[in-house]
C-alpha cells in the first residue's frame, strides 16, 4: 500500500512556521460583486505580527484550495466578509497539518412589503373602481396605469388620476415597513407600489415594497 506524502512546499512552510514560532496566520477578506475584493494576511507570534513573505506567498494560493469563498453576487446575495484563521495542528504521533477556520458575515438584499393606505374622495373611488384595473409605480419609474375599459378621459379625470398617483408615491416613500429583521438597514430611498383594492371607507390599499440590507452569520 502506497502512502501519501506531504508536498515539499508544505513541509518547508511547516518548518519555517516552527522556526519563526508562528502561532496564527489571519486572512482578512471582503468579497462580492463577482470578485474577491480586498484581502490581507497577518502573520502572528506570541510577540506580535511579523513579516514572513514565504509564509504569505504559500497561503496566497493554498487558501483558495482549502476554503470556499462566495464572491458571485446575484442581486439577492451581495457578498461576504470576515477572517480565516490558519493554525498548525500538531498531534503526538501524527503528521502536522494546517487547519483553516473561516468566520464570515454575508450580506443580502431582502425585499419587504407592507400595505399602506391612500384616502380617496367618493368621486376618486368611483373613478378608480370604474376605469382602472391596476396602478404600479415607484421611485425609479413613471407610473403605469392599466385601464379596465376604453373611454375618453376628460381633463378633470386626468388631473384626478395624476393627483392620486402623486399621493400614492408620497405615501409609499414615507411608509415605514414593519416586520423587518432585526439589524436590517434600508438600502436607499428606493420603493415600489401597486394598487390592491378600495375598501368601503374609500381607502385605497396599496402594497409597498422596499429593500433592506440584511447581515447573516456565515460558516
Image (cartoon, grey):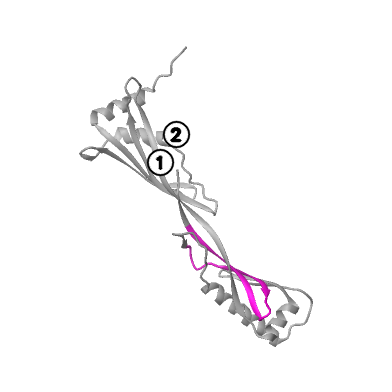
Q: Is 172 on the left-hand or right-hand side of 154? A: left
Depth check, mark 1 against mark 2: the one in front is: 1
Q: Is residue 217 left or right of residue 23?
A: right
Which of the pair 125/49 is nearer the observer? 125
In percent of width and height, residue 205 lies at 63, 73
Left or right: residue 87 versus residue 64 is left
**Rendered image: mark on residue 65:** 2
Q: Around disc 1, counting alpha carbons within 10 Å, would you say few (fewer than 14), some (14 to 19), or many (20 or more)?
A: some
Point 53% across, 72% down: residue:
175
The residue range painted magenta reads: 186-213
- Kindly indicate the quadrant of the structure image that contains residue 51: top left
Circle 1 SS class? strand
At x 24% / y 31%, what residue is drawn? 20
Q: Position of residue 11 (x, y in %)?
A: 34, 24
Q: In the image, what residue occupies the spot 22% across and 37% down?
A: 46
* Residue lying farthest to the front in this orientation: 200
Residue 30 can be seen, yes or no = no
Residue with the most extreme bottom position: 156
Query: Which of 179/142 is in front?
Result: 179
Q: What's the CA distance linking mark 1 and mark 2?
A: 13 Å
Badge 2 density bin: few <14, some 14–19, many ≥20, Cα 10 Å: few
x, y percentage for residue 36?
A: 44, 45
Q: Judge whether 59 appears above or below 131 on screen.
A: above
Q: Is residue 154 magenta?
A: no
Q: Residue 102, labelled with which disc?
A: 1
Q: In the rendered structure, which disc, 1 or 2, sits on the residue that comes first in sequence? A: 2
Helix, strand or loop status at disc 2? helix
Amino acid at each position: 500500500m502506497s502512502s501519501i506524502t506531504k508536498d515539499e512546499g508544505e513541509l518547508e512552510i511547516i518548518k519555517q512556521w516552527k522556526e519563526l514560532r508562528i502561532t496564527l496566520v489571519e486572512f482578512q477578506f471582503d468579497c462580492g460583486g463577482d470578485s474577491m475584493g480586498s484581502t490581507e494576511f497577518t502573520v502572528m507570534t506570541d510577540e506580535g505580527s511579523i513579516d514572513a513573505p514565504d509564509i504569505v506567498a504559500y497561503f496566497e494560493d493554498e487558501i483558495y484550495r482549502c476554503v470556499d469563498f462566495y464572491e458571485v453576487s446575484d442581486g439577492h446575495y451581495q457578498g461576504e466578509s470576515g477572517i480565516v484563521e490558519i493554525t498548525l495542528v500538531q498531534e503526538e504521533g501524527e503528521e502536522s497539518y494546517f487547519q483553516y477556520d473561516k468566520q464570515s458575515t454575508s450580506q443580502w438584499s431582502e425585499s419587504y412589503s407592507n400595505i399602506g393606505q391612500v384616502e380617496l374622495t367618493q368621486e376618486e373611488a368611483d373613478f378608480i373602481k370604474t376605469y382602472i384595473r391596476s396602478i404600479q409605480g415607484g421611485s425609479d419609474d413613471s407610473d403605469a396605469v392599466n385601464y379596465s375599459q376604453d373611454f375618453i378621459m376628460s381633463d378633470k379625470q386626468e388631473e384626478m388620476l395624476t393627483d392620486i398617483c402623486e399621493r400614492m408615491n408620497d405615501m409609499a416613500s414615507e411608509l415605514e415597513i414593519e416586520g423587518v429583521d432585526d439589524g436590517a438597514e434600508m438600502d436607499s430611498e428606493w420603493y415600489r407600489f401597486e394598487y390592491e383594492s378600495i375598501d368601503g371607507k374609500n381607502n385605497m390599499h396599496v402594497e409597498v415594497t422596499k429593500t433592506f440590507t440584511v447581515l447573516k452569520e456565515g460558516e
